[in-house]
Amino acid sequence: MSIVPGRAESIAPGVHRVLAPNASMMTGPGTNTWLLGDPPVAVLDPGPAVPAHIEAILTAAPHLEAIFVTHTHRDHSPAAQALKAITGARVIGRAPPRDGLQDQTFVADVEPVRDELFAVGALQLRAIETPGHASNHVCWLLEGERLLFSGDHILEGVTPVILVPDGDMSAYLAALARLKDYAPRAIAPGHGRVMGEPPKVIDALIAHRLAREHKVHAALAARERATLDELLVPVYADVPADRHRFARMTLEAHLIKLARDGRAAREGEHWRAA
């Protein structure tokens, strides 16, 4: 059954989803906004500041006390400002980096630290520091249900873009491995459907990233030196051309990681194997 924007649907006890009407190549069917509590008293990833979406959130959760965000890319956090103005709810998340891609309207009342617990009615949310896709990214674990709200760190069916210079491939892979220590039962992503078997999902994502890293290094080793654009096609031959502008960002993130690992070197606009 398709997910319909604007309609609150129950996912687990005390967890409801409202899909934002912002479907695109980058957001898939749209941003998942999560309402927490019975009745809902918190929203997680309020999404874009679209009036119809804000109205849908307030209709389903008229007595908001808290607004949580995973990160401040513009499809996840802009509605926080309007919801706070209407409800007075406190905003919990990390300040936006200044990389030109973030929601600079976002202002947090509380910046969570790693493993900090927050009460949401009778529920508890744990903040898990997960930089990589964005430096201020936080996943949230619903204690008891062991449901992981993964934002853009883990997505259904696709791998997230690592947006340099703020994004970091080394940090991303380390955070993925760390998430397994929390033993989530299911993953509620920022876009797409809820996923079961989290260890299998996480292991597959790590394997995919390391396989892509191998392709990047092999493409470098086959050339004396190369630019990003010269590496893009051989490394991402399996990716449709209309997605190459996004793949190019992640390619650079892979190269930066390889350079840190002593396996690549940068010379101006060119890269070479080290």
Image: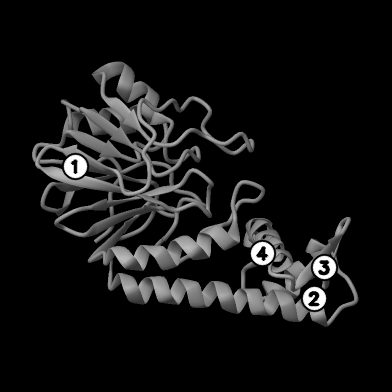
Q: Earlier in the sequence, mark 1 or mark 2?
A: 1
Q: CA distance from mark 2 to mark 4?
A: 14 Å
Q: Earlier in the sequence, mark 3 or mark 2?
A: 2
Left/right placement of residue 13 relative to residue 234 reads left
Q: Earlier in the sequence, mark 1 or mark 3?
A: 1
| Most foreground residue, 196 or 17 | 196
Q: Earlier in the sequence, mark 3 or mark 4?
A: 3
Residue type, label 4: Lys
Q: Residue at x 68, y 63 (%)?
A: 251
Q: Residue at x 43, y 68 (%)?
A: 177
Q: Which mark is residue 257?
A: 4
Q: CA distance from mark 1 to mark 3?
A: 47 Å
Residue type, label 3: Glu
Q: At numbered mark 3, what does the secondary structure look like: helix, strand or loop? A: helix
Q: Which mark is residue 220?
A: 2
Circle 4 packing at 10 Å, graded few (<14), some (14-19), many (20+), is: some
